[in-house]
Structures are given as structure tokens and as C-alpha cells.
Image (cartoon, rainbow, N blue to C red):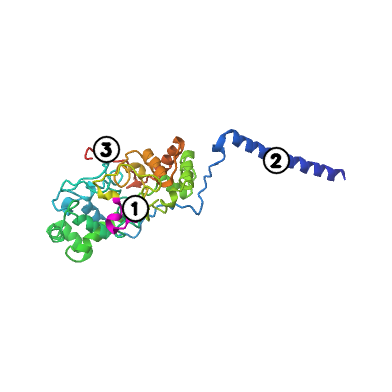
Amino acid sequence: MISARRSARFRMWATWRNRQAVLAVIALGLSFGVEAVYAIDRNPNPREPLAPLTVPYGLDAAKVALGGLLFSDPILSGMNKLACVSCHDLTAGGTINVRRTVGYKGRVHRFNAPTIFNVGNNYRLGWRGDFTSLEDQNERILLDENLMAANWPDLLARLRQNPAYSASFQSLYGRPVQREDLLDAIATFQRSLTTPNAPFDRYLAGDLDALSEKELEGYRLFKDLGCASCHQGSNVGGNMFQKFGVFAPPPSIDPDNDGDLGRYTLTGVDADKGVFRVPSLRNVAVTAPYFHNGSVSSLSDAVEIMARSQLGRTLNQRDVESLVAFLGTLTGEYNGHKLQPAPASSND
């Protein structure tokens, strides 16, 4: 009987102690403000809106090598002055640090040059998303008078007269250089341009120490604020369309640049004015300047603008810094080296 009473008293005491402990934790959380409420969970959720970067396999190594040579060779341009790397620097972030590049005829391009890295993981291509095929997009770029300014008869004749290229195409494709073979070689190389081993990918793979507390807080904000509703998947974007300026007008609209009209220039539909392909955020910390027109050079400024224009939110400094910290974890490696930003250019 005594033992039973002692057991009952012990259970009551234990319950009281547990309640006191819970109240103490709540009080501690309140004393430190909101920060204590959002405890950081280091374990990735198996249903994350973002996925690890998809690295291609089964690419023909010889075609990758040939495409790489072509990508760096001005032989593809009509005047033998420009190469693909002129706007997509593979030693930096896969782009160049200018707002909008200038073409052969001195006309400023409609859009900022996007990074070429991980382009094979994008479903939509180009700022207006007018392509779903790398081959189709490459052909348009090759023939554009203000870009590569080539034409097929001259380009194919030039490559067939080059002993090294002629031999390579004959060996790989079993015939003299053809239009579809050239496009295939370049696209195969582009599909190889992945940037694995970003800290965020290591985190998703189970390395729970790959991200700092601040970076994890930025990722939580990225999801909670709604950024991940458009920037999703393995490329953290690149798959859908969205209007730029849902809640507030976007910055620096140029009345002389019809590129600011977005998909409207393709469709003629009023609802498509200002609608663009949602860009990938892979390596975004090293691909300034930002937006379709390259109007913003600071990633912090870009984050604040996106919060206002797309989410209708004004962020405090801490949240901006946390989001920028998270975005920095999306920077991967190319050929075993972490990507670096391109140097600023005076060609602006």
C-alpha cells in the first residue's frame, strides 16, 4: 500500500517536473524572440521542392570533345571574330559580367547573357522560353545576324575545308560535316556542362554539416516565403514562366528595348507582356548582373527586388543576408574547381 502511494506521488512529481521543463523551454524561446521558435532542422526532408543536380551520363566523349572545340572557336561566326565563349565564359560563371552584350552590327542585344552551365537540365531555354531543344536554340544563335551571323552554306564549307574538323566529323558521323551533325556536337558538349558538388547538393545527399546555420535559415526562408514555388527542381528554376512584376514594377525598364516585353514579342498576347522563363538559380552568386536585362549587379539587391515584385514582401536585412547565404550554396564546380565570378567589363 505504501509502495503504491509512493508510486502515485512519484508519477505526480514527474508529471509536474515535465510540465515545468516544457514551460521553461517556452519561456526561454520567448525571451530570445522569434529566432528560438524557428529551430533549424539539419535533416533534409525527403519531399524537398529542390532536388540534387542531375549529372548526365552516357554522353559520347568524342562528341563532347569536338563540341568543346567548336564552342571555343570563332570559326562558327560569320566574320570569324566571335565564339560561343565570347558570351559564355567557361573559366568563370558561364557568362560574362555585362548587362547586355553588343552584337556584330553594334546593336545591343535584347537580353543579358544567361549562364551556359547546367543548361541541359533546363526544360525551357532562352529568357522568353521559346526553345525546348538545345539544337533549335543553337541554330537560331548561329544564324542571328547580330549574334554569330553565320549561314549554313558558308559555315559547312568552312568546316569541310578544315582538315582537323573534317576528319573528326567523318570519324564520328561517317560523312562530311552536315548541319544536324554540327548542332548535335555542340549540344552534346553543352549537356556536359554541369556543376556538381555544390554545398547544397552535399546537404541533400546527407552531409548535414555542409550548410551553416545561416545558410539553413536562408533555405527555410526560401521555402516559407514562396521562392521555391517557381525556382524548383534540380536546376532551381528553368522550367516554367512567370510575370516579372506581380506586385510591383520591375526595375529599369527600357522603352527602347522590346526584350522587356518578354514573351509578348513571340505571342502578341497582352497577358504575356513581362512574362519570362523563370531562370535557374544554380551558381547565381557568380553570374551577375541579374535579371533579363542585367539591370542589377548586387545579389542582395536582386533578392530584395524579387521579394517586393514577386512576393509583395519587404525583407529585413537579416532575412536578405540569410537568403544570399543560401543562394551561395548553389555554386558548384566545373572540372574540379569551384566556379568564380567573371570580372567586370567596361563593355556595358
Residue nearer the viewer, 80 or 311: 311
Q: CA distance from mark 2 to mark 1?
A: 54 Å
Report which residue position mark 3 lands on: 344
Looking at the picture, which amino acid does disc 1 mark? Val
Residue 96 falls left or right of residue 210: left
Q: Is residue 269 magenta?
A: yes
Q: CA distance from mark 3 to mark 2?
A: 60 Å
- Mark 3, other Cα within 10 Å: few <14 / some 14–19 / many ≥20: few
Q: Position of residue 49 (x, y in %)?
A: 46, 52
What range is drawn magenta here?
Answer: 261-278
Q: Residue at x 33, y 52 (%)?
A: 276
Name the quadrant containing residue 164: bottom left
Where 282 sits versus 64, above or below? above
Local secondary structure at mark 1 = strand
Report which residue position mark 2 lands on: 19
- Mark 2, other Cα within 10 Å: few <14 / some 14–19 / many ≥20: few
Q: Nearer the viewer, mark 2 or mark 1?
A: 1
Residue 151 falls left or right of residue 295: left
Q: CA distance from mark 1 to mark 3?
A: 28 Å
- Dot 2 or dot 1, earlier in sequence: 2
